[in-house]
Amino acid sequence: MIPNSRDALDIIERNDGRHDYLLHEGDKYLLNLSEVGSGIVSLPGVPDERKESYVTALDDVNRRYFDAREFEEDVRGKYHRYDEEAERNLRSAVAEGASNAVGTLRDLLSAYEAVADAVKTNDVAHAERKRLVRAVDKYTNRAIRQGWYPVVRAYDHALNPGERIAEGKTRKRHRMYGETDMPGVSQLLDTPIFDQVTPEELKAVRKLDSKAPDKATRVATRLVEHHRWLLDD
C-alpha cells in the first residue's frame, strides 16, 4: 500500500481518467484504497494480522484494477470478426480476469469479516464500538465501490468493440452471451474452472451498500442491472 501522504515529495497524485491514484517510484495505488487502508490500520483493538490481511486484500484489488485498465486500453475498439481464434482468446481473457476479480472480492469480504468481528468485541464503550463498526462497514463499501467495482467496469468496457451504436451493442451481446458457434463470457464463467459472484456474496455487498452515498452508486444494484454475466444465479 502507498500511504496517502500528499506532503511527501516522492508521492505524486494523478488521475487515469476515472480515478485518482498515487504514484510512487513507478508504482500506482488508487487513492480511495490508500485512504481505506490507512483507516483500517488506525483502528484500535484489531490484531495486526487481521489488519495486514485486509491491506493485502486491498493491494490485490489495486493490482487487479490497473491490470484491467491496461487490458481495456489494449483491446479498445477491436472486434476480430475474421479471426475466430483471436476473438475466442479475448473472451477467455475477460472471463479469466473477471473470475480473478471475484476471488479478490471474496478475500476482501473475508478480511472485512475478520476486522469487523474484532471491532465488535473491542473493550470500549458501547457508543464507541458502534462507531467503529460503522467505520469498518463504510471503509469496506468504499473499497468495493471505488476499487473492486471499477475492475468489473473495465472488463465490461473491454467487451465493447467500439463500432456504430446498434452494431456495437449487438457484437457486445455476442461477446457476453455467445453465439451458436462460440461461447460468450457468461457461458465461460458458468463452468467449474471460473468463479462468479454467489448469492451470498451479493447479499453481503448489498448489505454494505447501505453505506453508499446514494442509490446510484450501490454496487449490488449495478451488478444485477448491468453485469448479470458475473452473477451465479
Image: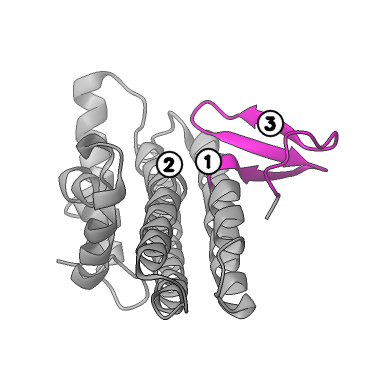
- Circle 1/circle 2 CB separation < 8 Å: yes
Q: Is residue 183 visible?
A: no
Instruction: Tell me if mark 3 has few (under 14), some (14-19) or many (20+) residues whose alpha carbon lies within 10 angstroms of its own.
Output: some
Examine the rendered structure and indicate whether residue 55 appears above or below residue 71.
Answer: below
Q: Quadrant of the N terminus?
A: bottom right
Residue extending farthest to the top is: 164
Q: Which mark is residue 102?
A: none
Looking at the image, which residue is at 43% across and 41% down?
154
Question: Is 51 contained in the magenta span?
Answer: no
Residue 226 lies in quadrant: top left
Magenta stretch in the rendered image: 3-32
Find residue 219 and report its horizontal and vertical position in percent.
Answer: 28, 48
To which residue does mark 3 refer?
A: 13
**Amino acid type, residue under disc 2 in the picture:** Ala
In three-dimensional space, the C-alpha distance between marks 1 and 2, rounded to whole angstroms, equals 6 Å
- Circle 3/circle 1 CB separation < 8 Å: no
To which residue does mark 1 refer?
A: 69
Looking at the image, which residue is at 53% across and 43% down?
32
Q: Tell which circle, 3 or 1, labels the residue nearer the N-terminal end.
A: 3
Q: Which mark is residue 154?
A: 2
Examine the rendered structure and indicate whether residue 167 appears above or below residue 95.
Answer: above
Q: Is residue 185 visible?
A: yes
Question: Is 24 contained in the magenta span?
Answer: yes
**Amino acid type, residue under disc 1 in the picture:** Arg
Quick check: 13 left or right of 225?
A: right
Nearer to us: label 3 or label 1: 3
